[in-house]
Image (spheres, rainbow, N blue to C red):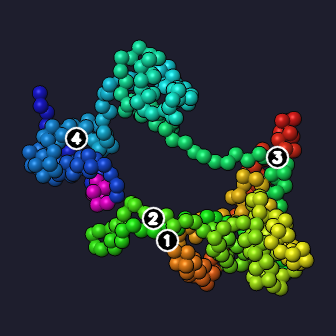
Amino acid sequence: MNLRYRVELSQAERGELTTMLSGGKHAARKLKRAQILLAADAGRSDEEIARTVAVSGSTVYRTKQRFVEGNLERALSEERRPGAERKLSGKEEALLVATACASPPQGRARWTLELLADEIVKLTEHESLSVETVRRRLCENHLKPWRQDMWCIPRVDGEYVARMEDVLDLYAEAPDPKRPVVCFDESPVQLIGEVRQPIPAKPGQLERYDYEYRRNGTVNLFVILDVNRPWRDVKVTARRAAEDYAQCMRELVDVHYPDAECIRVVQDNLSTHTAGSLYQAFAPAEARRILQRLEFHYTPKHASWLNMVEIEIGVLRGQCLDRRIDDPECLICEIDAWQRQRNDAGARIKWMFTTEKARTKMGRAYPSTAKESESL
């Protein structure tokens, strides 16, 4: 028996549906049900509603039925639909996860969805298994065996902690013009030229450039960043040998900070970042003169993130170097322009990691703390 359901909305329900249709993000099916209910409340026939809302007559009937027999929420919500049983049982899914986390077959660098599907078929009684089933089960377990991450794993010991706190304490010191703190590092840049002239952008069309490019060698960037004032300096060199490093240190003392009594330099553990590089480049008296005004502070091994200038180099690459530049002179001009703009704008690195936060968040890095927790 086909019953006729009469929809009578309250003022609150009518306002809720009107608000839903006026804005916000909702599923298209939910919006259509709201239109059906408002039209039915206005006294329109099922045939007219179906034609206006562009749905079938059965959809209009079921929506009205769920409202009358239930409530507004039931009428707007999606009914659960029966689905097919999962292809893999709980044990089989655990087997899939364990296989994906194990070593791939001999001769293969990593697991693929096809390899995993074939392997599970061999290990279970399934005659076949689709790649999509494997993908969904892996996605539910947050696994992507075809992807890898690479990172440096530091040896966290007393030496690591000592160097980390030394650098963090330098950053936390009150600014002293007589004893400035600067961060130093270098970064290679590849000179890349165009084989074909790019096509400029225009309305409705992105800029186009050819995938083929021309290699013109590499240059090196020495980057210096003042921790306590908005100043940085980028020097372009053909290489990064000990002599080049020594020249940067002499410029730091004689050009950039001629009135400073002692310049504290934060740097990584590269083999050229030593006092010996200055003796290699200059006469002993000159090397000694420069070193008497320098104080080197080294970041822990595999912890260059503690060097503030690493962030500045990332900004430089994103704002200035993220394009093809094939000429060293052009590169120097572009970097000089970027440097001037950034210095004039007063741009600084906002460093928020302190020694106190390190002791709180990196408790395991402190051997004494770890031993105390074990004894407890």
Q: Earlier in the sequence, mark 1 or mark 4?
A: 4
Q: Earlier in the sequence, mark 4 or mark 3?
A: 4
Label 4 vs label 2: CA separation? 64 Å
The magenta-colored residue range is 17-23
Query: Looking at the image, which residue is at 39% across and 67% down?
Result: 195
Q: What label does residue 157 carry, if any? A: 3
Badge 4 marks a residue whose secondary structure is helix
For the residues labelled 2 and 1, say whether their Cβ atoms are less than 8 Å apart. yes
Q: What label does residue 63 carry, if any? A: 4
Label 4 vs label 3: CA separation? 66 Å
Classify residue 213 by image quadrant: bottom left
Question: Is residue 227 in sight in this rendering?
Answer: no
Label 3 vs label 1: CA separation? 44 Å
User: Position of 10 compared to 316: left or right?
Assistant: left
Badge 3 marks a residue whose secondary structure is loop
Question: Is residue 148 in sight in this rendering?
Answer: yes
Query: Looking at the image, which residue is at 78% across and 64% down?
Result: 273
User: Position of 56 compared to 333: left or right?
Assistant: left
Q: Which of marks 3 and 2 is nearer the N terminus?
A: 3
Query: Horizontal and vertical percent for residue 156?
Result: 78, 46
Label 1 vs label 4: CA separation? 65 Å
